[in-house]
């Protein structure tokens, strides 16, 4: 098997691989999985800083009680847009970027299964985010009712409403096409020796994530479509006067929304399962249980949505069912935490930056998981609901989990992508500053929430002052530290430490993944012929 | 191409996807502006749709040319089939939202508005006079008096039309496999004709609803769910019929072999999916 490339369908002449297109047009018309992966990753990094700036505005306003910098309407827009930009612009695209870069290389495929569609997924993402960002400059301001877009509140949005809704549609199409592509690649493009149960965990987690995305993005699209018709076409889906129900929106939204949070965490698990064995110098502990745990988490994701709505006024039987079902998630998640720990147990561990981020992930994600368990208890959740406790909870599962593992993945694969070694000293400084400041930032928010401070407010009662100030200081340090990561990325691309990296970069990494059997930097086209051997630590 | 059966075709320099994105973005920006009452809205929308039409024609032509010149091996065909299957799965989830909405309102929220369960006090305080019986346009009688749509007129005819079109589509497929091009083309013509006949009947049905029955999209939750479900379905019938027309056009040009006819299969799968959704609609929207 060899790769055939052709000039746009006309001139398919030969069997040898083309190099990249010359000039900037390369990035517009590319169908190469590595190019598209790079586009996704840079776009995600840019959006990480845009969303981060919004977070800085929020923390600046909350630095002390009273109104300081922004008006309340704009503050609400910031909380809403921060969430939407971070979820749909930063975390999800970053993982799609990693999937684009790594999945074909990890399974020994020449490229993604549907390369033209791959290009379209990326550009639809850019279009969707452009629409979303444009709402900031519209009459009536950007959406300010929270990222969940609950009616009837969200229907009070000004000119921005249809733009925000169509942005969701575009982002949804982008995600569905991207996910279809990844699933088809994994199911159809593996090297002959790579059976499903020999795939790297990152590939497994993305296969399951892809399934989740294809199942849920249309649900969100349907929900926002009904918002649109309720606002502009006289329907009554979410209006009790016409026989509808605003709570129905919440059910539909969270049927999307709960699997959506696993879309952000499952690839995170995949990255951790990739990095930890390499630096513990042991195969991943309990591979098959990891696969089954991932699948179990994905299944449970579809049957627990109403734990986001305990206080909305559900029948008691509903409250009980959703409480117990939610608690079940702790079991497969516990299996995963146990396996990562057991992988490290008696390993010959070293602590390069990717491993530091991974260890911090295991510890801090466990903490975020525990607060999740606390909130699954319906009667207790009546106290926690819509307070800073929930803000602390999901930020622990997103920042020191998803974001940390994205950073870890960056440090882990940058040498492979660029052929240069990153600056380890700066990397470690970045890690320690991030790991300490993220706890200063989010840990006090648990206390604030338990004491009753509501989320999504620009001003607060005076007794919340101290912890808010500490949290804001942590936030500013965390935000500033991320500039170090930007520096590392640029520096590594430009040549890094000047040290020439080997093909396997990390000691014995070739045992852990096919990508380390390729040259560093990786050529434009890889595995034109599928590999016949797969790494020994794949079982 | 001589090596075509051993290579996985990786296209190079894709221009249609970017144009597709530009078309979609222009259409949606236009639609949003139109909804906000801006005068440039409809112009932008038409421009965007024009871009999309050009894009679809160009992209389909490219794919057909590549396919006919034998550039897609078995592996590429499997990827396309997987892509189509997962796409249809996403469509099923999209329709599930509206079926779910219908179920929820009929079985939960409307009875609650009528005071069922723990909601008696709510009803007594808010809408004591509300009689929670389906079909309803809600306690505020939103949209005024309306007649619900019966099942045994045009809808039954439409059911027969679509079911027959499923048969003719399969008949065409058998023709394709038996290398009987005449049967293939006749089957496809019948399928497309039945599809457009369905759309025509639905147009009559909507016209009757709006002009004689007082039933509109604004007729409370009944009108909302009725038109949303049947409307999105009708849109999908149109899309399916257009896809089948493209397949018919290609069949007439001599495309497809018994071994290699992904486009036909994809169109047929899509058509059967649309068919099954209609059966769901006929049962849950019209009959029950």
Image: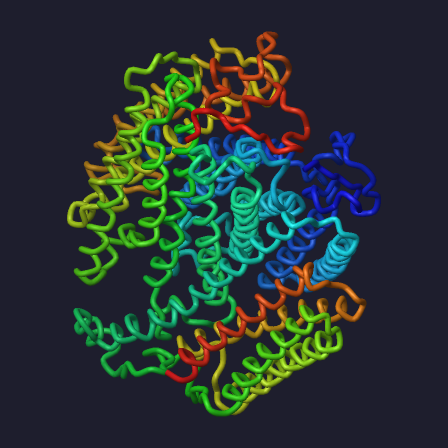
Rendering coords of residue A176 (x, y %):
53, 51
Q: Position of residue A538 (x, y in %)?
A: 44, 29
Above-or-below relation of B150 to A141: below
Report the residue at 57% width, 53% height from top. Answer: B83
Q: Residue furthest front?
A: B178
Q: Is residue B63 left or right of residue B230?
A: right
Q: Residue at x 54, y 58 (%)?
A: B85
Task: In the rendered view, tell whether residue A175 sits above or below residue A40.
Answer: below
Q: How many marks?
A: 0
Q: Is residue A54 visible?
A: no
Q: Quadrant of the C terminus of chain B?
A: bottom left
Q: Does residue B36 appear to the left or right of A116 in the view shown? A: left
Residue A485, relative to residue A209: is it above or below? Answer: above
- Which picture quadrant has residue B268? bottom right
Is residue A239 rendered to the left or right of residue A121? left
Instruction: Look at 49% across and 59% down and name the residue there.
Output: B89
> How is the protein colored in the picture?
rainbow
Viewer can see residue A166: yes
| Most foreground residue, A436 or B61 | B61
């Amino acid at each position: 098997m060899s790769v055939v490339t052709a000039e746009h369908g006309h001139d398919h002449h030969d069997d040898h691989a083309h190099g990249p297109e010359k000039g900037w047009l390369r990035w517009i018309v590319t169908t190469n999985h590595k190019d598209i992966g790079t586009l996704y990753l840079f776009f995600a990094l840019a959006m990480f800083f845009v969303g981060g700036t919004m977070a800085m505005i929020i923390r600046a306003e909350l630095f002390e009680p009273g109104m300081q910098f922004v008006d309340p309407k704009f503050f609400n827009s910031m909380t809403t847009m921060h969430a939407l930009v971070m979820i749909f612009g930063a975390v999800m695209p970053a993982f799609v970027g990693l999937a684009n870069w790594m999945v074909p290389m990890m399974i020994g495929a020449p490229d993604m299964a549907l390369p033209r569609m791959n290009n379209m997924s990326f550009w639809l993402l850019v279009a969707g985010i452009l629409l979303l960002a444009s709402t900031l400059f519209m009459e009536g301001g950007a959406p300010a009712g929270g990222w969940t877009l609950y009616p009837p509140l969200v229907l009070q949005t000004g000119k921005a409403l249809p733009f925000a809704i169509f942005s969701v549609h575009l982002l949804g199409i982008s995600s569905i096409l991207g996910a279809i592509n990844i699933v088809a690649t994994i199911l159809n493009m593996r090297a002959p020796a790579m059976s499903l149960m020999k795939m790297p965990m990152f590939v497994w987690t993305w296969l399951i994530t892809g399934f989740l995305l294809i199942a849920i993005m249309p649900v969100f699209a349907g929900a926002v479509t009904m918002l649109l018709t309720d606002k502009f076409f006289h329907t009554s889906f979410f209006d009790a006067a016409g026989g509808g129900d605003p709570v129905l929106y919440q059910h539909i939204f969270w049927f999307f929304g709960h699997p959506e949070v696993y879309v952000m965490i499952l690839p995170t698990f995949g990255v951790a399962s990739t990095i930890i064995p390499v630096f513990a110098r042991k195969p991943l502990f309990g591979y098959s249980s990891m696969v089954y745990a991932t699948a179990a988490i994905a299944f449970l994701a579809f049957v627990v949505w109403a734990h986001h709505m305990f206080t909305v006024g559900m029948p008691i039987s509903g409250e009980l069912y959703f409480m117990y079902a939610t608690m079940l998630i702790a079991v497969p998640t516990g299996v995963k935490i146990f396996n990562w720990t057991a992988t490290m147990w008696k390993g010959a561990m070293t602590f390069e930056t990717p491993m530091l981020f991974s260890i911090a992930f295991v510890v801090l994600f466990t903490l975020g998981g525990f607060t999740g368990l606390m909130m699954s208890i319906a009667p207790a959740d009546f106290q926690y609901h819509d307070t800073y406790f929930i803000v602390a909870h999901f930020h622990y599962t997103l920042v020191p989990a998803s974001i940390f593992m994205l950073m870890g993945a960056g440090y882990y694969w940058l040498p492979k992508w660029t052929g240069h070694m990153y600056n380890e000293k700066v990397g470690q400084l970045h890690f320690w500053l991030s790991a300490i400041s993220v706890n200063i930032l989010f840990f006090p928010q648990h206390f604030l929430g338990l004491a009753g401070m509501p989320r999504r407010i620009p001003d607060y009662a005076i007794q919340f002052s101290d912890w808010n100030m500490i949290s804001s200081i942590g936030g500013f340090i965390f935000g500033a530290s991320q500039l170090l990561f930007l520096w590392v990325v640029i520096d590594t691309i430009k040549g890094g430490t000047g040290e020439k990296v080997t093909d396997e970069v990390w000691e014995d990494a070739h045992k852990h993944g096919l990508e380390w059997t390729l040259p560093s930097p990786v050529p434009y086209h890889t595995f034109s012929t599928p590999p016949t051997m797969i790494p020994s630590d794949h079982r | 191409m001589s090596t075509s059966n051993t290579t996985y075709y990786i296209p190079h320099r894709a221009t249609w996807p970017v144009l597709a994105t530009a078309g979609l973005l222009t259409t949606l920006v236009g639609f949003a502006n139109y909804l906000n009452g801006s005068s440039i809205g409809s112009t932008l929308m038409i421009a965007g749709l024009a871009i999309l039409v050009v894009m679809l024609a160009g992209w389909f032509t490219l794919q057909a040319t590549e396919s006919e010149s034998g550039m897609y091996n078995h592996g590429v065909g499997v990827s396309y089939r997987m892509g189509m299957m997962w796409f249809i799965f996403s469509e099923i989830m999209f329709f599930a939202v509206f079926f779910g909405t219908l179920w929820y309102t009929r079985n939960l929220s409307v009875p609650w508005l009528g005071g069922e369960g723990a909601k008696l006090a709510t009803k007594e305080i808010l809408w004591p006079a509300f009689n929670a019986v389906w079909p309803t346009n809600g306690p505020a009688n939103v949209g005024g008096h309306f007649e619900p749509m019966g099942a045994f007129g045009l809808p039954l005819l439409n059911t027969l039309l679509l079911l027959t079109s499923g048969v003719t589509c399969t008949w065409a497929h058998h023709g394709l496999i038996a290398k009987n091009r005449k049967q293939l083309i006749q089957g496809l013509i019948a399928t497309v004709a039945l599809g457009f006949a369905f759309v025509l009947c639905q147009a009559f049905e909507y016209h009757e609803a709006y002009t004689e029955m007082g039933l509109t999209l604004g007729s409370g939750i009944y009108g909302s769910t009725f038109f949303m479900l049947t409307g999105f379905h009708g849109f999908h019938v149109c899309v399916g019929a257009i896809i089948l027309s493209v397949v018919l056009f290609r069949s007439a040009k001599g495309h497809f072999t018994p071994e290699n006819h992904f486009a036909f299969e994809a169109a047929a799968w899509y058509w059967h999916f649309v068919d099954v959704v209609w059966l769901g609609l006929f049962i849950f929207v019209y009959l029950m």
